[in-house]
Image: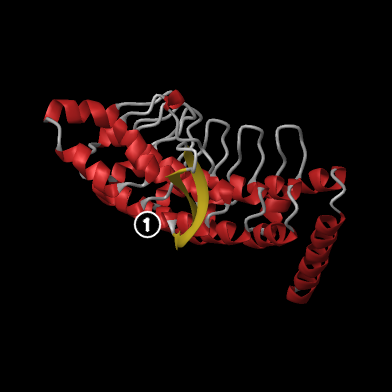
Amino acid sequence: MTKQLTGKRDDTALHSAARAGNLAAVKEILTGIEEDALKEQLAKQNQSGETALYVAAEYGYVDLVKEMINYYDLVNAGIKARNGFDALHIAAKQGDLGMFPTPELSVFGFLEVKMRFSRVTLVADILKVLLAAHPELAMTVDLSNTTALHTAATQGHIENVKFLLEVGSSLAIIARSNGKTPLHSAARNGHLDVVKALLACEPGIAPRIDKKGQTALHMAVKGQSLAVVEELIRVNPLSMINMVDTKGNTSLHIATRKGRAQVNHSYFEFINQFSHLCLSAN
């Protein structure tokens, strides 16, 4: 994150303090104005539609988020930026942050932003703070019906995924407007640990189809992770392999068309193993 600290983004003083990670300044602003003015300040959005809480969450400032959330009600905490994300969504997207932007004056007197190494902050800490105050935020969605779990699963942030599943396992079955569940997203992007976590939480989601009739296995063969493909095949072998999408394609059709030789090999290995098991049973 290398955003410039300038007035061009229409930041308020609270935005600027949050962006700089200045806890003392944030406290001074929050406690130094009357209630009506405070509510207006908390809900104020800059040109990108970001609230000050969103900014603090995006930059990974746990202490700031912990302080600020005490003043935010559910409505203001869930205000979405122009990108469709609220504070919880942007935190879920970030993953673990090991570097933070630090504003300082240059020798010429200009405000600059420099990246400095700091302690690694688990963004799961920010998720915990936000959801402890307003658990309902876990169910908020953007314009495409994307939850924070979808976002974390797409990015492969396993700690965020695990925490969100602890908050509500039902998040795993919520589909985006295109019908894709978090499992579809994780499978497409080859995030094996996320796929395993989602399946452990909701084993029945593996055969779920999107609006194109495709399962997570269809998504997985489009990616590059053979391990994800094999994991999904093991869940419900015959059902998963034989499911066709709206165009009549099984996942094997897609793998063949995309030249996924290793995937095809795994399919045939499974078929051979299954055949031997059937013969042994008879």
In the rendered structure, the answer to whether residue 192 lies left or right of residue 92 reads: right
Residue 104, position as x, y percentages in the image? 44, 45
Residue 139 in view: no
Residue 95, position as x, y percentages in the image? 50, 53
How many labels sit on residues?
Answer: 1
Residue 160, position as x, y percentages in the image? 46, 55
Q: Which residue is drawn at 40% across and 36% down?
A: 86
Q: What residue type is labelled 1?
A: Asp
Residue 146 in view: yes
In the rendered structure, the answer to whether residue 168 lies left or right of residue 112 reads: left
Q: Which residue is drawn at 52% across and 58% down?
A: 158
Q: Which residue is drawn at 69% across and 58% down?
A: 233
Residue 236 occupies quadrant = bottom right
Report the front residue among 32 and 186: 32
Q: Residue at x 54, y 46 (%)?
A: 182
Residue 84, position as x, y percentages in the image? 46, 30
Residue at the left extreme? 34
Question: Mark 1 = which residue?
Answer: 125
Look at the numbered disc 1 and give the secondary structure of its residue.
helix
Report the front residue among 83 and 97: 97
**How are the residues colored?**
secondary structure
Asked if residue 65 is positioned above or below residue 247 in the image, the reply reads below
Residue 37 occupies quadrant = top left
